[in-house]
Image (spheres, rainbow, N blue to C red):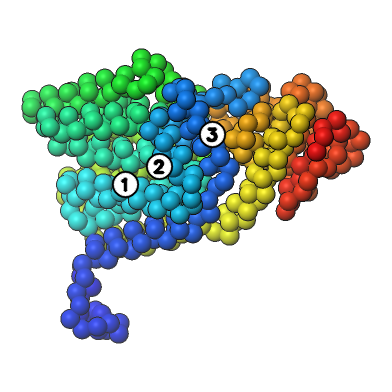
Amino acid sequence: MMLSAARLTACGGIKGVALPVPFVSRCLLYAAVAIAVARAPVAIAALDSDAFAARAMLVSHAVSPVFGPETAAAGSRSGGLGWLGALVATALAATPLTIHLVTVAMLLATLALVEVRARSRSNATSATAAAAVAALCGCDAAYVGAPLEAPLFTAALLVLLDRPTVLRAVLATALTLLWCNTSASGLLGVAFALAAALGALLDRRPPDERRALWLAASGACLATLATPAGLAYPVLAFHALRIAGALEGLASTAPSEIAPVAYHVGFFLVLVLGLVLGLRALRLGGALSALIALALALANGANLPLFGAVVAPLLAAGAVRLRTTVPSSVALALTCVAALAINAAATDAYAHARAAQRDGALLARRAAGLPGVRRIFCAPVDWCASAVASGGSVLIDDRVDRAPSRVRAAQLALAQARPTWRRVVRQYGIDAIVVNGDSALASLLRLNRNWRGIAARGNAVLVARRSVHA
């Protein structure tokens, strides 16, 4: 299908212009991503959390430090930084413009790699459709703090492993080495490399391809040992990603961090198409990678961008093997839906939430500087990321999924102003609380003579014990 001169003339267009639909779709999709990121407010609390984790990582070369009284939380919201990731996070914290530019570059590079992989397996139209489907799976990633490096590195690694040679195996090893030093998600590179090697064996691919893939898998395993953490990296990364704990929740299909529009449109579209085509149409090598990505996406909605990056090119390839093609009109429709969904995430609700977050973050920083404050509590909890970055001790911050169950139970009791809230305050030595002014907890604190208001900003208020000197 072409946007021909006749069609454009009928619509009032300019004669003599003919544009292929895949080209128009690609431009629309990439422009929509850039515009959506430009509209996304910067999450100050997330930046504070990542910058703090980065400083700690650069000093200790270990999983970033605990944030609460008894939590084993590991890593930042992004799931654990490496020393290279720490350097990048520190640099990005300098200016919102830098954050936006790097975010745009990472998202567009991921989509481009998905297209490259899909095009090598199908055709230009199917490749554009695959990029649109991948974008649907990750359209909220820029707004909810989902990790962007995992889908980018995964897409690049799979491009190298699709047509394995010794040179590509060496490049895949170098890529995994870079990945492991950037983030704990480098451990996923090992999983996908091993899945590709095992799939090649099951699919009975040529011996030279099998040798190259096993070389890449071996190199990926060795790359996990070439970090400042040394032999401890696989264990630290495993705990930082919370793979074991997350997989316990596979029965629940509700994502923990991604917004519903991306989850329902992107995830279920990919899942249904995969079921229609069947795992065999994806070949066993692709099916193993798809199952790994599916498990990660079901366990945590933050991994939906990874799911799209892995599976979308496989769907294009499976359709070709079943002698079906993606019509240009369908590719264009998918691109339009993806463009709308990506920008629908940048709503006023997000902007309002970010404004409230800024107010709460500023008060949390102030609470961290008050003399006599042993521990701080915030509701919403992500405000306390700024308190952590300022050197304060908090009950819990934005890494709720990584906190022990006792700490999460205490957080709920206090946030919901349950009858046990006084006991929680005493047990954990909480001296300052940053909370929404219209919450039940704020009302109880106003009525309690042992607490007094210190400051207010927007709808956020800072309340402290009377023994604390403002």
Instruction: Report which residue position mark 3 lands on.
Output: 52
**Is residue 298 rendered to the left or right of residue 387?**
left
Q: CA distance from mark 2 to mark 1?
A: 9 Å
Instruction: Report which residue position mark 2 lands on.
Output: 148
Name the spot of residue 57 as percent of width and height, x first: 46, 27
**Is residue 86 rendered to the left or right of residue 161?**
right
Above or below residue 460? Residue 216 is above
- Residues at circles 2 and 1 in contact by the CB criterion of under 8 Å: yes
Mark 2 or mark 1: which comes first in sequence? Answer: 1
Mark 3 or mark 2: which comes first in sequence? Answer: 3
Q: Residue at x 43, y 34 (%)?
A: 86
Q: Amino acid at mark 1?
A: Thr
Q: Residue 110 got which mark? A: 1
Q: Amino acid at mark 3?
A: Phe
Q: Quadrant of the C terminus?
A: top right
**Mark 1 surroundings within 10 Å by alpha-carbon count, few (fewer than 14), some (14 through 19), many (20 or more):** many
Mark 1 or mark 3: which comes first in sequence? Answer: 3
**Is residue 305 rendered to the left or right of residue 173?**
right
Nearer to the camera, 317 or 234: 234
Circle 1 or circle 3, nearest the eye: 3
- Residues at circles 1 and 3 in contact by the CB criterion of under 8 Å: no
- Residues at circles 3 and 2 in contact by the CB criterion of under 8 Å: no
